[in-house]
Amino acid sequence: MSDDVVLDLANRKSALLLTADKDFGECVFRLSRVASGVILVKLAGIPNFSKATIISETIAKYSDELPDAFTVITPTTVRIRSIGT
């Protein structure tokens, strides 16, 4: 599926889009595509179990801030930027 199709599907379902694809940042910011929320995971080189723990803890901690935001999760930081709809 193309990024546009994936983003449209997430929006129709009012779902957060969890991805490792940096192209969604371009879709949201440069192309001004509407998004109900995107979480970009930048955890390369980390074991999958640890990734799952980091992601689930981040979602639990910031759940109120994630809708209508572009979030980037790295091993040491979480950045949340409102994108509005």
Image (tube, helix red, strand yellow):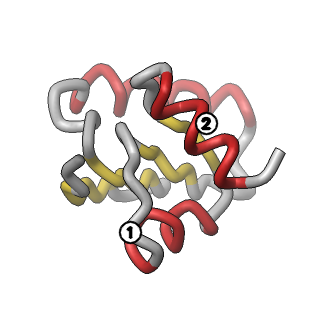
* Residue depicted at 57% across the width and 44% down the height: 7
Q: Residue furthest right?
A: 1
Tell me how far mark 2 sits from mark 1, CA to CA: 29 Å
Q: Residue at x 46, y 74 (%)?
A: 31
Q: Is residue 33 above or below residue 63?
A: below
Q: Is residue 58 left or right of residue 13?
A: left
**Which residue is tagged 2?**
51
Residue kind at label 2, given as amino acid type: Lys
Type of amino acid at the residue the image marks with label 1: Ser
The structure residue drawn at horizontal position 18% and vertical position 36%, both measured from the top left corner, is 65
The numbered mark at residue 65 is: none
Nearer mark to the viewer, of 2 and 1: 1
Left or right of residue 20: residue 63: left
Counting from the top left corner in percent of width and height, residue 2 is at 78, 53
Q: Is residue 45 above or below residue 52?
A: below
Query: For mark 1, does the 10 Å Cα neighbourhood hold few (<14), some (14 to 19), or many (20 or more) residues?
Result: few
Residue 55 horizontal/vertical position (percent): 48, 32
Q: Position of residue 44 (x, y in %)?
A: 70, 57
For label 2, count other residues whose C-alpha is less than 10 Å away and answer few (under 14), some (14-19) or many (20+). Answer: some
Task: Residue 74 in the image: state x and y as whole percent.
Answer: 47, 57
Helix, strand, or loop for circle 1?
loop
Quadrant where the N terminus is found in the figure: top right
Furthest toward the bottom, the residue is 30
Residue indicated by mark 1:
32
